[in-house]
Structures are given as structure tokens and as C-alpha cells.
Image: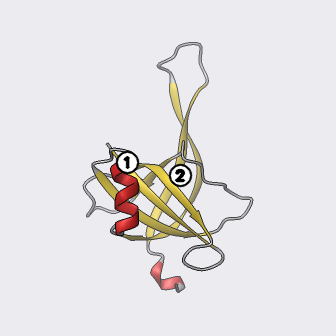
Amino acid sequence: LQSGDFRTPVIFYTYSNQGPYPDETEVDELYRCFAQTYSPSMKDLEILDVTNSEVGLSIVIRDPLQSYIPRTKHKVKVEDFRLERDTYNIKDIRLDTPESGFITMVLGAL
């Protein structure tokens, strides 16, 4: 992977409830970076099939080390006008793939 491969802006966030009412949720932005996006591979499609996701996407980001640690409960907003959806759930996280210092994530949406 090269620096020019990371062209798509992505935002990682989570919902938090700060108020006394259960429907008062706020978006907390956790991390923002550029990613390489591609169609899911056969292995990724199997993961999406198990989680009953209709739409899937795979992304690769540089490992932010302690700045941000991705979790499966986080949401990802992919800022690309060509996609059907822009918000996805993280379904799978693979560290140090395809090379050391990178994180591959499988994203899915219902």
C-alpha cells in the first residue's frame, strides 16, 4: 500500500446518552482519517453473511496506535458519494493486514 491509495475520508463515531431520557443520543466523533475502500473478498462476504448484513464494504486504514482503537460497537461514516449508504457498522477487525502498521475492517449495514 502507498499513501496515494488512501483517498476516502472516514469518520469513526459512537452514540452516547448524556441526558435522562433514553432517546437523547448524541454522536461522539472518535477518529477521522483517510482509508482505502474496496469490495469485500470471499472471506469478508462470509463474515457479512453470518451477521446478516445486506450491504458490505472493506476498508484499510493506517494503524493509529493509541490515538484510536477500533471496536465492533463503533459506527463508520464513509464520505463517498458513489456508495449506496454512508454509515456502516464494524463487523470484523484485522490488525496488521495486509502489512504491518495497517488495520483492515469489514463494514456491514442492515
What residue is rendered at 41% in x and 64% in y? 58
What residue is rendered at 50% in x and 21% in y? 24
In the picture of the structure, the residue carrying the numbered disc 2 is 12
Foreground pick, 106 / 45: 45
Quadrant assignment, res 41: bottom left
Residue 21 position in % (x across, y down)? 53, 13
Foreground pick, 39 / 66: 39
What residue is rendered at 44% in x and 59% in y? 106
Q: What residue occupies the far top of the structure in this picture?
A: 20
**Residue 28 visible within the image:** yes
Would you say 25 lies left or right of 66 here? left
Would you say 7 lies left or right of 95 here? left
Q: Where is 7 relative to 20, above or below?
A: below
Residue 32 position in % (x across, y down)? 56, 59
Would you say 12 lies left or right of 45 here? right
What residue is rendered at 54% in x and 47% in y? 72
**Residue 40 visible within the image:** no
Mark 1 residue element? helix
Q: Quadrant of the C terminus?
A: top left
Categorize mark 2 by other alpha carbons within 10 Å: few (<14), some (14-19), many (20+). many
Residue 75 position in % (x across, y down)? 48, 46
**Amino acid type for the residue under numbered disc 1:** Val
How far is disc 1 from disc 2 in space, using C-alphas?
Answer: 23 Å
Foreground pick, 25 / 104: 104
Mark 2 residue element? strand
Q: Which mark is residue 50?
A: 1
Disc with the residue nearer the chain's start (1 vs 2): 2
**Amino acid type for the residue under numbered disc 2:** Phe
Residue 81 position in % (x across, y down)? 28, 61
